[in-house]
Image: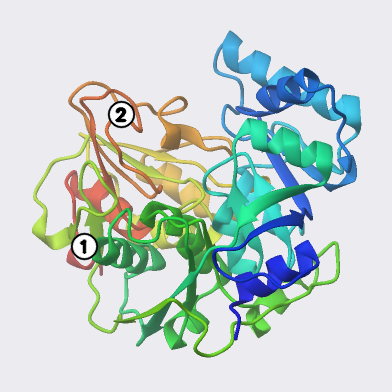
Amino acid sequence: MKTAVEKILSRASGGEASAGDIVEAEIDVYMIHDPMGALVEDALDEIGAEVKHPEKVVAIQDHFVPAKDIESAILSKRLREFHLRFNFGAYYEVGRGGICHVVMPEEGHVVPGDVIVGTDSHTPTSGALGAFSVGIGATEMAAAMALGKLWFKVPPTILVKGEGSFREFVHAKDFILQVISEIGTDGAIYKAIEFDGPTIRELNMDERFVLTNMSVEAGAKTGFISPDNLTFQYLESRARRNPRPEYSDKGSFEDELLFDVSSLDPLVAAPHSPANVRAASEVDEEIDQAFIGSCTGGRLSDLKAAVKILRGRKISDRVRLIVIPSSRRVYREALRMGFLESLVESGAAIGPPSCGPCLGAHLGVLGPGEVGISSSNRNFRGRMGHPDSRVYLASPSTVAASAFTGRVTDPREVSI
C-alpha cells in the first residue's frame, strides 16, 4: 500500500519510495520569482554550474509588481536577465502574469504526477492538481537546476476528509482555518496533507488551491488533492504535458482526520497565528484596512464573493479596501464581468496582479497600531507591515463584510 505522494516519488526516483526513505527525484518543473531569482543565479555561478533543463524553468515577476524601489527594480532586472541568459521555458513579465502560485496552474505548467520545486514556501498550492509540489531555498534550487534532480525525504501523508456541504458565505478558507486550529501550526511538519471526501469533491478549483496552499501553515511539506473529473476539465485547455495521475491506496495514510463542515461558521485567524482561530461573530474589533487578493483570495470566485457582499454598498469611511486580482487572466475576466467596476464604486482601490501587501512590502503596508483583515495566508507579527500592526485572516466574504461595517464582521450579518 502506498500513498499518491509515495507513488509519484517512486516514479521520479526510479525505485520504490516509502515514507522516511531518502530519494533523488527527477524534477519536472522549476519555478523561480523576482525575490529569489538573483540568489539562485549567484549560487549557480558560485558552483560553476549551468541550468541543465532550462526548458523546464518557469520564471515569474510577482512580488514587487511593478517595482517599488531601486532594490526591487534590481531584483526584477536580475530575473529578467537570468531568463535571457538561459532562455527559460516560460517567463512572465510585469503585467503579463501574476502571482506565481496562480499562474503556474492557470497557464498549464502543472499536471498530475509532476514533481515541482519553487522558490516560495507556498509552492504546494499546485498539489491541488495532483502534483508533488514543494517550496525550497535558493541554494537547493541552484543544485536542482544544475543536476536536474533533488533529494527528498519521502513524507508520510495525513488524510483530511471533509463531509457535509458549506453553508452560504462559508468558504475553503474557513475550512482550512478550522483544520489548522485543530492540528496546530506544527501538526504536519515534514508530512503531506491529502484532502478528500465529499466536501472536497464539491469544491471548485479556486477553493481547492486554498487548501493545498495553506497546508503549509500547519507545517506540511506539501498539500495534495487527487485528480478527478473537475481536475481534468480544468486542465483540458491548459495542460502542456500528458498527466500521470496517482492515487493513494486505502489504508496507506499515517493518520486520518474527519471534519464535518455542515455547521461550520465564517472564521477568522486572529493575530498573530493562523491557528488562533475564532468565529467571526465572536470578534469585536475595528479595522483600518481590508485586503482582498493574494494566492488564497484573489481568484475570480473570490472577487465574485466580495461583489456579492458589496454591490450597491459603500465601504466604511474609516476603512481602506485594497483589491488585487491574482493574475492577468483574473483581472481581464473580472473587468469583463463588471466585478472591478462594482468594487471601485464601493470604494476599493484596485492594484495590478501581484502579491501586493501579503508580504508586508508593497501596495498596502500597515502602519504602527493599525488593524487589517486579509484574504491572504499568514498573519505573523509584522507580516503585512509594522510589527505593531495586527492582521486577521478571513475569507473574501468576511473581508468584504468587514470593509462595509468597519469592524471584523460575520458576512451573514450584512447579507441581504
Query: Which badge, 2 or 1, is on the more N-terminal residue?
Result: 2
Q: Furthest residue to the front?
A: 21
Describe residue 164's horizontal placement relative to residue 334 as left or right. Answer: left
Considering depth in this image, is 15 or 119 the residue closer to the camera?
15
Residue 139 appears in the rendering: yes
Q: Neighbour class for label 1 at 10 Å: few (<14), some, many (≥20)? A: some
Residue 311 appears in the rendering: no
Q: Indicate the position of residue 320 as horizontal and vertical percent values.
A: 31, 34
Q: Indicate the position of residue 314 as horizontal and vertical percent values.
A: 29, 46
Q: Quadrant of residue 391?
A: top left
Q: Which mark is residue 414?
A: 1
From this view, report whether residue 186 is shown above or below residue 204.
above
**Secondary structure beneath label 2:** loop
**Secondary structure beneath label 1:** loop
Q: Indicate the position of residue 255 as horizontal and vertical percent values.
A: 39, 77
How many discs appear? Answer: 2
- Which residue is disc 2 drawn over? 382
Instruction: State how the image is colored.
Output: rainbow
Q: In which quadrant of the rendered image does the N terminus lie?
A: bottom right
Q: Nearer the viewer, mark 2 or mark 1?
A: 2
Q: Quadrant of residue 385?
A: top left
Q: In which quadrant of the rendered image does the C terminus lie?
A: bottom left
Image point 60% across, 28% down: which residue? 65
From this view, report whether residue 54 is shown above or below residue 393.
above
Describe residue 181's horizontal placement relative to residue 77 as left or right. Answer: left
Image point 45% across, 57% down: which residue? 220
